[in-house]
Amino acid sequence: MLCKVTLIAVAIAQLCVAAPAHRDVGISIALQKNSSLTTANGTFNHAAAIRHSVKVANKYRQNLINFHKNTGRFPKNVTTIPPPKLMPSNLRRRQNESLEDIGDDTEWAGTIGIGTPPTPFLIDFDTGSSDLWVPSSSCADCGAHQTYDATVSSSSVALEGTFEIEYGDGSTTSGPIYTDIVTVAGVAARNQSFSAVTQESSQFSEDTIDGILGLAFPDISNLGQPPFFQTALVQGSVPEGVFGFKLSSNDSELYLGGTNTLLYTGSLEFHNVSEVGYWQIGGASAVLNNDKAIASGFDTIIDSGTTIMYGTPSDVNAFYSAIPDSQVFDQANGLYSYPCDSPPSLAFSWGGNLWTVSEENFNLGETEEGSGQCVGALSGEDLGLGDNVWLLGDSFMKNVYTAFDFDHKQVGFAALA
């Protein structure tokens, strides 16, 4: 079942570009365990899944706004910006409950430092966005989070403009923009643009993380500036423009400056980015039970900041329709259930290997205790990404080692060791 992270390591390749990367030069960071979309008794946390769906939809709405502002066009197959997705009224009143109570979405987090001397922040590393933001010391509604005080950092520089993101509960995250030194496990990005927010959405004020560090391309940056990893690459803080993810319930790792060859077997299967902005690759197929292609020729966005997988509603309906005794669980949010004792096998291919989603990662839990019906981690929902684009989050990434290559604009997969 979908599990929260208990450990993430942030490692840095420190050999020459041509040499393989090795784990023993990296740094491991132990983290607290967060909850998941599956409750302790093995049932599906429906309310948490809806909140997550709203968060994801509005994240990608903001990405579209940023992309259009930065490039003067929409991504392929997109013609308009969708309206914000609203939080159901019966869930809004619970937004101030703690993360432990509401069972929020999976986050893959580690500690970074900002400023001179550095202030530590617990950060969600997100390949589906491109900006860095943390709470400001002048924020009155940022909960118990660590905060950034520009007056105590000798390397802080205030810039003009304002960072702002709107969320489906009507709230916003906004604040001034700065540059400062940002470090992740010793990798430094000098004069890195970020926001220290003075107003924080209720979706974040009670979260365990302090902020978000985006790892996608600058085309979708709200700030219109290079993200942390690209800044570090240009400044020579990493030996090559590649970073790798292993996501699992144990020993998760983000590897900066290459890939950790100890964490995967064989070679990486790379695919070119089809739309710079996202880590989006084309030519995908979705395969049921290793032999039946349910959909083909679509694009996929690989996003560590999204918990489950989202396909186009018609394709996802076709997938579950091919599973005996599957049912619509929540039509409004594109959620389906299937018999727990006969789980389907879902795999993806981009013209090479079949990359299978394990039963554990596909099963979000029973619809209710003893029902015998389990909710699948593939949802059919229109996120405004275009008619032929799927979004693959952690439920897919936890099955593979994933490499993100800025140097050649490609995404690679390998079998976990």
Image (cartoon, rainbow, N blue to C red):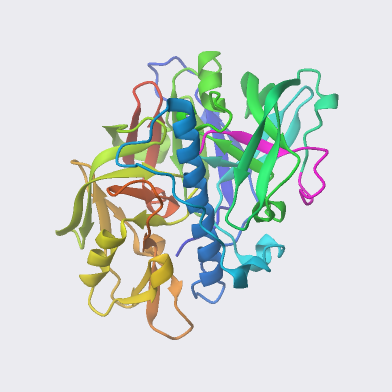
Closest to the observer, 95 or 30: 95
Q: Quadrant of residue 347?
A: bottom left
Residue 33 on image: x %, y %: 62, 56
Closest to the observer, 203 or 168: 168
* Quadrant of the snapshot with the C terminus: top left
Residue positioned most to the left: 291
Q: Residue at x 66, y 61 (%)?
A: 99
Q: Quadrant of residue 138?
A: top right
Residue 82 on image: x %, y %: 44, 50
Tell me if residue 130 is in the magenta stretch. Answer: yes
Residue 116 on image: x %, y %: 77, 22
Q: Residue at x 56, y 35 (%)?
A: 10
171 over 215 or under it: above or below: below
**Viewer can see residue 369:** yes
Q: Residue at x 61, y 34 (%)?
A: 132
Relative placement, left or right, of 172 versus 244 is right
- The total of numbered circles placed on residues is 0
* Quadrant of the snapshot with the N terminus: bottom left
Closest to the observer, 233 or 265: 233
Relative placement, left or right, of 268 versus 297 is right
Closest to the observer, 71 or 108: 71
202 over 230 or under it: above or below: below
Residue 290 on image: x %, y %: 18, 58
**Viewer can see residue 216:** no
Stretch in magenta: 129-145
Q: Main secondary structure of the magenta part?
A: loop
Relative placement, left or right, of 227 versus 294 is right
Tell me if residue 143 is in the magenta stretch. Answer: yes
